[in-house]
Image: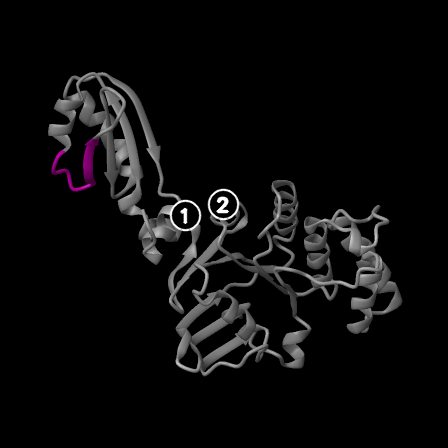
Amino acid sequence: MTAAIDIRGLVKTYGRHRALDGLDLRVEEGAVFGFLGANGAGKTTTLRTVLALTHPTAGTVNVFGHAPGSAAARQLVGFCPDVPGFLPWMTARDVLETTASLFRLSPATTRRRVGELLDLAGLKDTRLRVGGYSRGMRQRLGLAQALVNSPRLLLLDEPTSALDPLGRRMVLDLITALRGHATVFFSTHLLPDVERVCDSVAIVHQGKVAANGTLDEVRAALGGAKHRVLVTVDDRDRLRAALTGRPWIVTVADSDTPDELALSVTDIREASLRLPAEIAALGLRLHRLEPREASLEDIFIDTVGGPR
């Protein structure tokens, strides 16, 4: 299957600044893909390269096998920036109908697509001019505009940044509704958004992809040392002594709760199976066993070297 996005050895320099430093990335068709990175990591430069808004210094970029900016690629891509801009006197219908005319859609197709997209974006019954829209409404209209040409690939730059909780939820619900209808690729630094809607993720750091795969694959590859298990027994000193040195345990420490140990483990599933047996063999009573898988935030901070 041809990848929606296939990037190999991408380098982009601005004078002496190396914004991208040999970035490799493959986004499979149909994925809802989160592109994570701290500010200045190279997210926006990568997006701009895929959109042919900037040209690479070295490396290759393909969109469904086509060169970025080619006539074939333009028909397959939709894009919504982090702050969509519209003429304030237009209505949502005006915006979408004007966009449809730029793609030379037929009148019948335009009527159908505009109606569908206004409904999808929750703007069908809105009579306000765009100048009176909230930030969330503008973002949803931007997403609808990016979908007018029924793109196979939807590119979003920080789609939920600066939105209030209600607006953010509505935008994420809209992205979720696109699953199976288009490949969605969005850059963000909001980790809960990625965990909520994405099935695949890449973490970019200093112009390179530092981690890439499904959420489960990234957690398995990079999250082992961050897996936690909280276990409460009637004699934690005996359990601590018995567990010290086990190959599947990284650290054993007392927690603030009486008789509770906080364990870091290499494999949370193995630990969940082995611990009850270990406790039973010691003749102890198990009061609580709570596995806590590494969060995406844990992995992100470890990968980019942020503060702990």
Residue drawn at point x = 39 percent, y = 81 percent: 16
Q: Residue furthest right?
A: 107
Residue type at the position of mark 1 = Leu
Q: Is residue 251 magenta?
A: yes
Q: Position of residue 287 (x, y in %)?
A: 28, 18
Instruction: Judge from the rendering whether residue 176 lies leftward or rightward of residue 144; answer left or right.
Output: left
Spatial CA distance of label 2 from label 1 is 8 Å
CB atoms of marks 2 and 1 within 8 Å? no
The secondary structure type at the circle numbered 2 is helix
Q: Position of residue 278 (x, y in %)?
A: 18, 27
In the image, is residue 217 above or below residue 258?
Answer: below
Residue type at the position of mark 2 = Pro
Residue 1 appears in view: no
The mark nearer the N terminus, 2 or 1, is: 2
Residue 67 appears in view: yes
The secondary structure type at the circle numbered 1 is helix
Residue drawn at point x = 49 percent, y = 45 percent: 192
Q: 106 or 188, which lies in front?
A: 188
Instruction: Judge from the rendering whether residue 203 lies leftward or rightward of residue 97; answer left or right.
Output: left
Q: Position of residue 83 (x, y in %)?
A: 64, 60
Q: 266 or 269, which lies in front?
A: 266
Residue 280 numbered tag: none
Residue drawn at point x = 65 percent, y = 45 percent: 167
Instruction: Judge from the rendering whether residue 267 lies leftward or rightward of residue 284; answer left or right.
Output: right
Q: Which residue is mark 1?
A: 296
Magenta range is 244-253
Residue 69, image quadrant: bottom right
Q: Is residue 235 magenta?
A: no
Q: Which residue is mark 2?
A: 192
Instruction: Judge from the rendering whether residue 234 lies leftward or rightward of residue 19; answer left or right.
Output: left
Q: Position of residue 85 (x, y in %)?
A: 71, 63
